[in-house]
Image (tube, coloured by chain):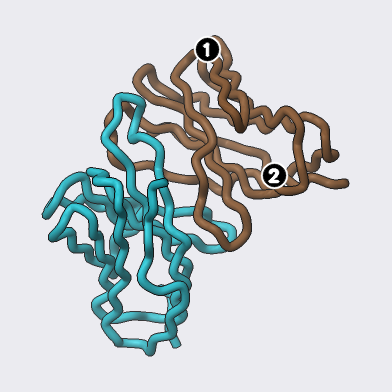
Chain colours: A cyan, B brown
Amino acid sequence: DVKVTQSSRYLVKRTGEKVFLECVQDMDHENMFWYRQDPGLGLRLIYFSYDVKMKEKGDIPEGYSVSREKKERFSLILESASTNQTSMYLCASSLIARGGLGELFFGEGSRLTVL
Amino acid sequence: DAKTTQPPSMDCAEGRAANLPCNHSTISGNEYVYWYRQIHSQGPQYIIHGLKNNETNEMASLIITEDRKSSTLILPHATLRDTAVYYCIVVRTNAGKSTFGDGTTLTVKP
């Protein structure tokens, strides 16, 4: 089975701290994604990557950056955390497929609280 | 990517078929319809996808109208474990990004 592992299920950080959210997938997928999920707003795409060292902005990239140095690992970075970044963060991966972006495999999520 | 519209919530009796509609009236020819579901406190799970033909797998069936402007996800015999938020999304071929809306909260009742 494909496994997408997010480094922390729960994090509590203070305003202004630098935050790293790590995601690792074990199926050699080309595509990796970071979403955030908030009540009433659904899942919103922050950034995605379709290859090592490649990244593209999603719908809400402001305040975030990403890093993909290895194919299996995609990191989300909050350079200076703010309270409005308190959210559930979901990582996903997929193969490149003719049928659209391919089946997305999601991790369990990381719930970040910024105080 | 085309926008989708789903009802915010639906109920279904256990053992009955659950029919979840999705409107995607601005879909274009190279866009696929995907369905995912999210059970509370877990990441979303892929269910099924299609382009224009109806599709069936072990989880569900997907019926796409001939004009492709809407689709219906069918869970043939809903169980309590099917209670979840169901997301319908439309994605361009080989496009990297996808956007999830608010989805439909399906509650299966005994």
Q: Which x, y percent locates residue A76? A: 28, 66
Observer-nearest of B54 and B92: B54
Q: Give the farthest residue toward the front.
A: A1
Could you tell whether A42 is left or right of B18 in the image? left
Q: Amino acid at mark 2?
A: Asp
Residue where numbered disc 2 is placed: B82
Q: Is residue B53 above or below residue B77?
A: above
Residue A58: mark in rendering: none
Query: Quick check: marks 2 and 1 in contact, CB under 8 Å?
Result: no
Label 2 sits on a secondary structure element that is: helix
Label 1 sits on a secondary structure element that is: loop
- The residue sitting at 85% across, 39% down in the picture is B13
- Disc 2: host chain: B
- The residue sitting at 26% across, 71% down in the picture is A77
Residue where numbered disc 1 is placed: B67
Q: Which x, y percent locates residue B90? A: 44, 32
Q: Amino acid at mark 1?
A: Asp
